[in-house]
Amino acid sequence: MGSTTSQSLHLPPNGGASEGTPVAILLDMRVHIAPCDRYRLRVTTWGSGAGPHAVVLPGISADWRGLAPQIRTLRRLGWTVHVVDLPGFALPPALRAPDATVVQLADYVARVLTSLGIPPALVLGHSLGGGVAMHIAIRRPELVSGLVLIAPVGLGVSLHWIYKLYCVPLLGRALLRPSVLRASSIRRFLVGSRRRDDPRFIARLVRHGERARPRALSALGIRIDGPLTKLSKIPTLVLWGDEDRVISASDARRCKELPLAQVRIARGVGHSLPLEVAAWANRHIEKFVTALTTTELRAA
């Protein structure tokens, strides 16, 4: 295992930035660049650094903006929030094919969390980030106090054909280019009937796509085989849209194996659930984390 260190970043007087140079601070936001083997993971933190802590893992070719409503909710509730961008997704170098598995990504994130000294945290992940969150909980349960999984990969084999195309290296990179991911594609594949005809919302997702770095992920290592017994002691909230055309909500049935899991399905909602029904998602998340912190205080 290679070394993992971190650097705290602040805005230089001239506003410039280079590797190893502090690059950003805004109110209570801090940005770290955490080297891990050949990669550099960007970690954006909001809050004073006091507990409770939450780690947020965006999906493929996404960043914190795709989960901004959930980050705001956790901050309002007093949580310190750390958003970890996966290797090759925010900063170069590109993710190498041998490292493009959910297990390997989970290992990188776990090592960075350890290097930053983040205590056991709620881990919230969407899509690919949800799959990574589950593997962190399975492989390094001491780092996880609870899970919020939003349409996560890894619970089944029902990846729809559009996600499988993203996983083909050359084709996936092409599909993730802004010139390809247009409003029509977003309406067809990423959004449910509730927001499909909302032009302002669709335009917002297009803007997010224009800013995303084109990345593709190997389909190998996505599914969690066997029973989910290693997650049985971790309080878990699962949120899904019943019109998800990327990862079918039917995969949520595996969560019945988990005695501490709650499953909530949103009607008329697609894969962009965190933004499509932000208020709905945040109500469930607030209720879940309030119960989680209350239980922890009682245990203490």
Image: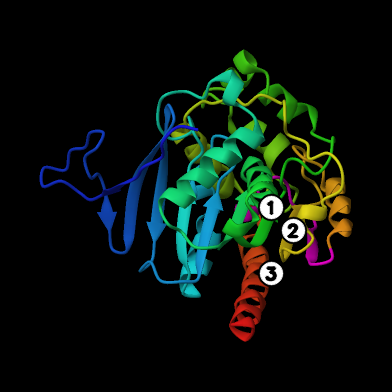
- Identify which residue is drawn at 66% across, 59% down: 148
Q: Earlier in the sequence, mark 1 or mark 3?
A: 1
| x and y percentages locating residue 85 in the rendered image | 48, 42
The extreme left residue here reads: 13
The residue where tag 3 is placed is 284
Q: Which residues are magenta?
A: 259-275
Q: Nearer the viewer, residue 55 or 299?
A: 299
| x and y percentages locating residue 174 in the rendered image | 58, 18
In the shown orientation, is residue 111 left or right of residue 181? left
Q: Quadrant of residue 3?
A: top left
The residue where tag 2 is placed is 238
Q: Marks 1 and 2: CB-CB under 8 Å?
A: yes
Judge depth for marks 2 and 3 and give the one in front: 2
Q: Is residue 138 visible?
A: yes
SS of the residue under disc 1: strand
- Identify which residue is drawn at 58% across, 25% down: 99
